[in-house]
Image (cartoon, coloured by chain):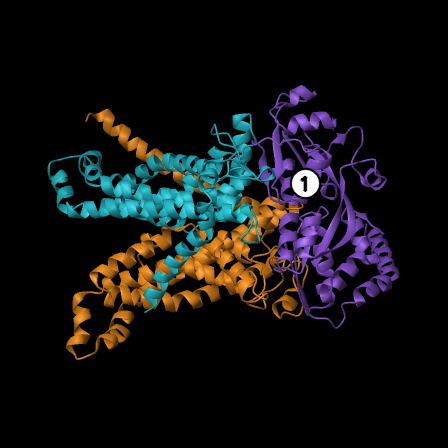
Chain colours: A purple, B cyan, C orange
Amino acid sequence: MIKRAMVAMITLCTALLVTLPVHANDLDRFAGLSGDLKIAGGTAHIPVVKEAAKRIMTLNPNIRITIAGGGSGAGIKQVGEGLIDIGNSGRRPSSKEIGTYGLALHKWAIDGVAVVVNPANAVTALTKDQLGRIFSGEITNWKELGGNDRGINLYTRDESSGTRSVFWKKALNKGDIALSANFVVSNGAMKTAVANDPSAIGYMSAGFVDQRLTPVVLDGVTPDAASIRNGSYKVARGLFSNTRGEASGLSRQFIDFLLSDQGQAIVKEKGFIPVK
Amino acid sequence: MSALVCCLLVLLILGFMIVTGLPLFGQSQAMDLLTGAWSPRNNLYGIAPMILGTLWISLLSVTISFPMSLGCAAYISVLGGHKKATVMKGCVQMMTGIPTIIYGFVGVFLLVPLIRETAGRGSGMCILSASLVLAVLIAPTMILFFIQSFDRVPRSWLDAVDALGGSRVQKLVYVVLPACVKGIVTGTVLSFGRALGDTLVALMIAGNAVQTPNSLLDSARTLTSHIALVSAADFESMEFKSIFLCGAVLYLITAVVILGARLIEKRGNHE
Amino acid sequence: MNRWGEKAVYALSVISCMMLFGSVATLLCYLLIKGLPALNLGLIFGSTPVGDALLLKRQVFDGIFPAMAGTLALILLAITIAVPLGLLAGIYMAEYSGRFTRNVFGFLFDLLSGIPSIVVGLFGFSAILFLHHHVSEALVPSLLVSALSLAFLVLPYIVKTTQMALETVPRQTRVTGLALGATKLQNIVFCLIPESFSTILGGIILAVGRCAEDTAVIMLTGAVASAGLPNSLFKGFEALPFYIYYISSQYADQAELNQGFGACIVLLLICATLFILAAIIQRKVKHTLLYRH
């Protein structure tokens, strides 16, 4: 046991030693910098941004990064109004938004929007047509889809969500979402809600999917890294970090870090698809 | 002096709300917003479902809480023994100090699954769950109000009952309760105001759907959660105007509630 | 009323007591069972060594230390703003105001104490947004904005406690100073305030508890999910109740959820301590001060 642990430790240390120089280089850009960076918006981005912030602030305590959610719409509006430095969005900002606020877009990951159900649910594959009818409130019982005799509980996000807008356009073909749907405030909250409710169905960032819930096979395609990367899973989007005007100062460095080798490694580690 | 400053601040809030909300009323949109549905995609920003949700949840919670509080208050100040009553009163006072967020947190993980399994349908995030938690949340305040009003019953009346050989229950039913009707009404009205203004419990437990609720197991959104949920960053957007209207409606209802409570209390004093 | 009626009334009242106390006891037990295992230094400091965290050498990332520090900073600020204002207003209400002004202002303070806290938050948010647009781009939702809004929220408590404390000073004490030739101001400062000091202090501590537990105000005015220790008035901050709210809806794994339960217990302990402190100081807590959310 102890021996095995030792071996593991040594392997880990070696791995760290080997990879450390590379990583150090990517973080070097923050040496000697100081100041504040306010990030808010898209909630799919949070795990990656949080990890990046942690590494940066550990290396350089003079930099302070605050992270908040709110959804893509809020991120775009707030960065446009100058309330924050970087506004994340899980969808491409509309040309109107780009024009009004003079936004600069930085896409650093690709992500799918997966339809998710509780692991206790027997239904694990749906067609887009069925999905549309579930979300419009036409199908109200899992029995009609070959599952248990339980009512379907819909979970959705508010209009500010980029995940919602991508899902609505690409999976529901702009169909209605029933008014009876419960609202949750973020990707994380969607995960919690669906994982706790046996008759739930919802949609969320594919990067957030773990063993606590089941991703639904949509039209025969499973939403995983491979299918999203090669484009066979259609309900996908980029993860953007937007700045008002061209990014400069800390914002510039932060975005460059996300696009660096180490940044992209974090992206991959957190379940998203790197753009490089 | 500073009292003036504070009062000015109150008026400032009100004025601010009116000024910002004014464009709404000018365009005769106000009625549409008050009575319409919420669907930003179709340019509908009505808050009617939220007003209904608020009323459902707060009325139900007061309905649940009222008998419970009355019973507790009666036990503490009339029916129970002195020693037991003192301890219980202390506990009730402590309960008012439990943070709202804790009620919400436990509600999410304990009550919601329970309601879901018991009801057999719905997600468990519904009007009923939120009202139950709110009922427990407002009960201590209501009880303390009731006790306060029970304690104002003149000592001599109570002694008279004892002298006539009346039991404690008779004392409660024939003397204390009739003498305290106004106090009870005031306490209930103020607790209603408190249930109305609570944000976290409804936000975490009621499900936040924007439908007009039809049953206790329906998910619903309150005005307060709506303000918390709709993020807006500029004055011009309709979302912002809409949450401002929510704020104004809440403000108005609160003002009416407090004015009502004060009027009842005043009338009581004159008699 | 017959025997059975009497018994029924008695039984109903006992049942209602049991219902209320039962549900609160269930709540607390559930919290304790779930949260106690998480209650350790790791909950507060994460993986950072305790000494380093306390000496601010290293930042804490996985613990609730920054949230606790944020809450502390928030309380201190809000109370520093609210206490002098509230005290002065209370003195004015009790000693200087006429019948008419007392009535009108009394109503306004009641109204203020009845405003839902989320509306106060909305006001704070709108005000800072207004300033951001028209005064300076640097003004954004931050610790200061939250503290100001919170101060506003607890102001009516403090005013009312002060007013009531002063009004209940016995007449004899009240006139003694004046009879000895003290001016009205001297009488207030040297006689009345010291006499009612414990009641006022109790009220202030209850206001502190209110600041510690409030979530609705700060979620609109500057609380964020991750910010580190607070170091500036003009930046976002973390706070304990907001952390609990955040965890409740988006915990990533069981460990994080347990941390949420742990954080609940910490918050409960803080609030209970403050409450008991207030009760001891005041001996008799005036519950009317607590009406408000």
Write down the quadrant of residue A144 in the picture. Answer: top right
User: Dot 1: what SS?
Assistant: helix
Q: Position of residue C101 (x, y in %)?
A: 25, 61
Give the residue drawn at x 16%, y 68%.
C172
Q: Residues within 10 Å of mark 1 (few under 14, many from 20)?
A: many
Q: Looking at the image, can residue C225 be seen?
A: yes
Amino acid type at mark 1: Ser
Q: Residue furthest front?
A: B27
Write down the quadrant of residue B88 in the picture. Answer: top left
- A6 vs B93, nearest the viewer: B93
Image height check: is A95 above or below A85? above
Report which residue position mark 1 lands on: A165
Q: Looking at the image, can residue C214 be seen?
A: no
Image height check: is A155 above or below C46? above
On the rendered structure, is B191 left or right of B103?
A: left
On the rendered structure, is C128 left or right of A77?
A: left
Question: Number of marks in the image?
Answer: 1
Disc 1: which chain?
Answer: A
Q: Position of residue C159 (x, y in %)?
A: 33, 62
Q: Position of residue A134 (x, y in %)?
A: 65, 27
Q: Position of residue B144 (x, y in %)?
A: 31, 47
Q: Residue furthest bottom?
A: C181
- C5 vs C171, nearest the viewer: C171
Give the residue drawn at x 35%, y 36%.
B68
Image height check: is B115 above or below C66? above
